[in-house]
């Protein structure tokens, strides 16, 4: 049975676990995260499919199951798995996506590496995704493509299936034209995106950047521009916009441009916060802290996350404020984004060296200022750390959204705690009650963390109440409703038979 909803994402919609020398497919252990969020849309479809890639030693092996059926708590759906060789994965994902696209998307032009890119392989892999999606889709179906490593998929789908609706959602920032146009494949990428019916982003700034890029390359007309939701206008962030383009036209085809911030599953996080085992973990952490306050930083080991800048700031604070020594600890959780990437290994080494230098300079036998953790913490335990933290310090240099700061607010059922947030995180646009900081400024970083540590209880609780209200209002369910509204707003495209008759 063909599907009326096809989701195209590079990751498979389950976890592969080895049990007794065989691979078992298990449902994601936590309903919090992008994969479970996307799977929740299956409940709105009569029949649904998911297209992803799976590494295969021999893609031509007839025993490789290209299409499997899944039946889990989200319903019954098909998964179309594309067998990619290790070489294809390395070229398409580790090199083109991470060494060429990623630094440009986050405005790190100096880290952009064009030389090793094999563009024909990137096209080949994107074409395989498009073919699989086109095969799975019923007449007039909606195909929902996700993220920058599948930029060419919409254009290919439009060639194969002009009858379907195509939506594309970006989970990263989208840069200004002078940055994006560094990419030599810019026109091909943008033309593919303009074949969509909907192109979605987290915040209005990214919408405006996308339209500016499109206008710089092609004859694109802006049909409609709207005033931004007041909830997303904040004077203290560099990413705030007053108006945003919402509809454009290219070669007679209308494209809706949507700004909708992804949220978290607040209900689930609060359930975890109330669990007895979370309370036990919280008590243990508080006992270990004693009278000391904990600053909590959580992110990936990536140059975009600002981890080095955080550690250096903490070191300066301990240098300039000796009265804080022994009274404040920084738990810095930096999980490796990709162990195969040299750039990330270099960041990890620098994190370790910086933390070691600061611990050596200011630590003692009974107190170490920084605890550096390089592995993921189970979510229920993480919620306990959120609850124990006096301050959550989330200061990426660039970030599409950042859900850690929203998880922190959702976890604070006690109504206390302070969020220090980079104004260059997409979340800064809808989390204005946070203490905003500029991670490129030493003075701004240092003063923000000191402000958070010295804040009185009344102000802490007032800010946290406002944060929790915003996180609840724009949670994952609100995002889901917004995406569904965008799907429904797109007019049905001509059926295949009508197109052939023309």
Image (tube, rainbow, N blue to C red):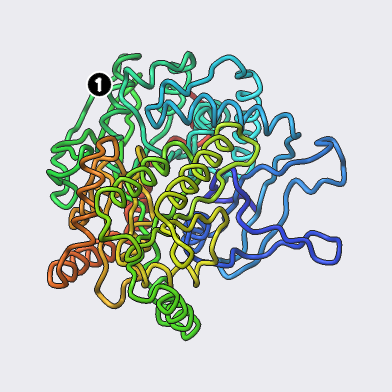
Residue 474: give x, y in percent of width and height: 28, 59
Residue named by callout 1: 221
Question: In the picture shown, does residue 190 fall above or below 245?
Answer: above
Q: Is residue 143 visible?
A: no
Residue 258: give x, y in percent of width and height: 30, 41
Q: Quadrant of residue 15?
A: bottom right
| Name of the residue lying farthest toward the bottom | 276
Q: Quadrant of residue 214?
A: top left
| Horizontal side of residue 296 vs 448, given as left or right | right
Residue 176: give x, y in percent of width and height: 30, 24
| Horizontal side of residue 418 vs 121, given as left or right | left
Picture residue at 86% right of the left edge, 61% below the top: 21
Query: 432 or 458: which is nearer to us?
Result: 458
Query: 80 or 382: which is nearer to us?
Result: 382
Query: 498 or 297: which is nearer to us?
Result: 297
Query: 94 or 461: which is nearer to us?
Result: 461
Task: Give the secondary structure at mark 1.
Answer: strand
Picture residue at 44% right of the left edge, 56% below the top: 370
């Amino acid at each position: 049975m063909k599907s009326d909803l096809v989701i195209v994402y590079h990751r498979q919609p389950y976890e592969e676990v080895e049990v007794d020398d065989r691979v078992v497919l298990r449902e994601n252990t936590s309903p919090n995260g992008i994969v479970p969020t996307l799977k929740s849309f299956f409940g709105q479809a009569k029949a649904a499919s998911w297209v992803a890639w799976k590494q295969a030693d021999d893609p031509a092996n007839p025993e490789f199951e290209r299409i499997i059926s899944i039946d889990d708590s989200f319903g019954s759906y098909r998964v179309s798995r594309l067998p990619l060789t290790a070489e294809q994965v390395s070229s398409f994902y580790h090199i083109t996506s991470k060494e060429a696209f990623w630094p440009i998307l986050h405005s790190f032009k100096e880290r952009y590496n064009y030389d090793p890119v094999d563009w024909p392989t990137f096209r080949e892999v994107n074409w395989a995704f498009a073919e699989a999606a086109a095969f799975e889709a019923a007449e007039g179906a909606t195909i929902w493509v996700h993220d920058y490593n599948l930029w060419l998929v919409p254009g290919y789908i439009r060639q194969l299936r002009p009858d379907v609706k195509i939506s594309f959602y970006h989970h990263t920032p989208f840069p200004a034209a002078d940055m994006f146009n560094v990419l030599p494949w810019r026109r091909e990428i943008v033309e593919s995106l303009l074949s969509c019916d909907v192109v979605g982003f987290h915040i209005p700034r990214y919408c405006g950047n996308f339209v500016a890029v499109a206008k710089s390359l092609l004859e694109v007309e802006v049909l409609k521009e709207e005033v931004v939701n007041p909830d997303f206008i904040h004077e203290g962030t560099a990413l705030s916009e007053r108006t945003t383009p919402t509809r454009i036209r290219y070669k007679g085809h209308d494209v809706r441009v949507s700004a909708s911030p992804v949220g978290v599953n607040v209900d689930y996080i609060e359930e975890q916060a109330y669990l007895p085992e979370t309370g036990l973990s919280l008590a243990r952490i508080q006992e270990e802290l004693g009278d000391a306050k904990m600053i909590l930083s959580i992110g990936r080991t990536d140059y975009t996350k600002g981890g080095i800048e955080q550690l250096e700031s903490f070191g300066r604070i301990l240098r300039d404020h000796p009265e804080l020594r022994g009274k404040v600890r920084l738990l810095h959780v930096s999980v490796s984004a990709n162990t195969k990437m040299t750039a990330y290994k270099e960041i990890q080494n620098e994190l370790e060296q910086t933390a070691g230098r600061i611990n050596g300079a200011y630590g003692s036998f009974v107190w170490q200022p920084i605890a550096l953790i390089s592995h993921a913490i189970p979510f229920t335990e993480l919620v306990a750390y959120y609850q124990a933290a006096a301050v959550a310090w989330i200061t990426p240099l660039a970030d599409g959204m950042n859900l850690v700061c929203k998880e922190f607010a959702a976890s604070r059922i006690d109504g206390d705690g302070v969020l220090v947030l980079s104004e260059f995180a997409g979340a800064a646009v809808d989390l204005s009650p946070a203490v905003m900081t500029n991670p490129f400024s030493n003075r701004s970083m240092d003063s923000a963390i000191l402000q958070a540590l010295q804040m009185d209880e009344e102000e802490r609780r007032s800010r946290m109440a406002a944060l929790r209200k915003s996180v609840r209002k724009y949670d994952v369910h609100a995002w889901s409703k917004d995406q569904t509204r965008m799907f429904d707003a797109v007019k049905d495209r001509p059926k295949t038979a009508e197109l052939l008759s023309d």
